[in-house]
Each structure stands twice: as C-alpha cells, then as structure tokens.
Image: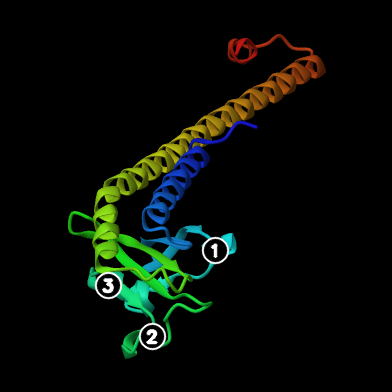
Amino acid sequence: TQLSAAAVSTLNLEKVFSAVLGRAADLLQAETASLMLLNKNTGLLEIKAVVGLQDALVAVTGVRLGDGIAGWVAAEGKPLLLQGKVDDSRFAAAVPKNGVQSAICVPIKYQAETLGVLSVSSRLPDRQFSDDDLRLLTTFADQTSLAIRNAQLYDQTMRELEQVRHLQQAKLDFIFTAMREISASLERVHSQVDSLIRTEQIAPTPGQELVQTL
C-alpha cells in the first residue's frame, strides 16, 4: 500500500526522535530515557520517544507546563540534576520512582524557543549522574535542537501539502460530478424532444434542432 506524504512525514519524524533519544541514552549510559515535545495547540508536553520504558507511555496524556520535573524544566528553561532523595517540595510528587537512583532533565531549545525536554535516568546505585553529565546532556540537547526543529517543519510542510492535494482532488471531483450531471440533463432533454417530435409528428424547429446537436 502506498503511503501518503503525511504518513511518510510522520515516519521520518519518529525516526529523528528515536535517533536523538537513543544517542542521548548511549552518551550518558542511561537505562531509561524520554523525549517530550511541546504541543503549541494544547500547551502540553507530549512524549514522542522512549528508551527502556514501555512504548505505551508515548500515548499518555501530556504534562502541563510547570507540573512535575519535565513541566518545570520546560517552563523555566533550565536543566535539572536529581541525585538520590530529593527534598525540594516542587518535585516531591514527581520524583522518579521504580528504583531510579539518578536522573537528568534538560530543555530542548531552538534559539529562544523551548521545543521540549530530554530526560535520562539510571536505576544503578553506582551510576549517579554528575554535573559533567548535566553539561554533556545540555550541550547535546542544544546541538540536536536544530535537527528536531527541521523535522517538525518538514512534517508541517508535508501535512500542508497533503491538505492542498486533498483540496485539489475535491475540486476535480466536484467538476467531474457537475459535468456528469450536465451530460445526463442534456440526454434527458434530447430524449424528451425526440419523444415530443414522434408524438406530435411535427418537424423539429430550428431551436429543437439546436438542442439535438448539443
């Protein structure tokens, strides 16, 4: 089955997200990682890719700006390093669970615009992320922000082109339908004129002849 331009665009976008996240997890030797992007229409952070986590998480409801760790990082535009117990009340209800020992969450920015957040975590007691790791992931997010932004723009362009194609096709369908209806109407007129001529047994007038030649 041939994929539409929008479908192909979506697949390309997912590949970019997966590649970026996989590279980040490798760099930090992280067991789990997630990439969340900001949906401008809803104002929510949405998970676009995961590593070491259930794929079902990608479909979860988005996170509001300011809520939890990811929401705070996106709203403030500042990176965050979590090690062991977190006493900060802002994140008391959002501290990583499931045995996570350390985590880093950094904003993904393109120029002055925050596109989303990149997070990595580790469950290994001897793998505590450091300030150097924080700087590394922050630099990585800055370097990949252009690729993510370009992928988003490409996806948007492909979707707009798909909409234009659908609109053009709808116009053509309308024209063809109208032509068929006009043709059918003319055939009915021809039939009625022929029937009238045969019934009345009269010669066609110049006007009737004109209709018959249409």
Res 65 seen here = no
The extreme right residue here reads 199
Which element carries disc 3, helix, strand or loop?
helix
What residue lies at 81% left-to-right and 19% top-to-bottom? 199
Helix, strand or loop under label 2: loop
Left or right, 57 with respect to 198, comes to left
Q: Earlier in the sequence, mark 3 or mark 2?
A: 3
Q: Position of residue 79 (x, y in %)?
A: 26, 69
Give the vertical position of 176 relative to 13 (above or below): above
Q: Are marks 1 and 3 in contact (CB under 8 Å)?
A: no
Is there a contact, CB below 8 Å, between mark 3 and mark 2?
no
For label 1, the residue is 53
Q: CA distance from mark 3 to mark 2?
A: 23 Å
Question: Which numbered disc, 1 or 2, marks the residue that appears first in the sequence?
Answer: 1
Residue occupied by mark 3: 75
* Neighbours of disc 2 within 10 Å: few (<14), some (14-19), many (20+): few
Query: Which sits earlier in the primary sequence, circle 1 or circle 3?
Result: 1
Which amino acid lies under the numbered mark 1 shown in the image of this protein?
A: Leu
Q: Secondary structure at mark 1?
A: loop
- Amino acid on which the number 2 mark rests in the picture: Lys
- Of circles 1 and 3, the one toward us is 1
CA neighbours of label 1 inside 10 A, class few (<14), some (14 to 19), many (20+): few
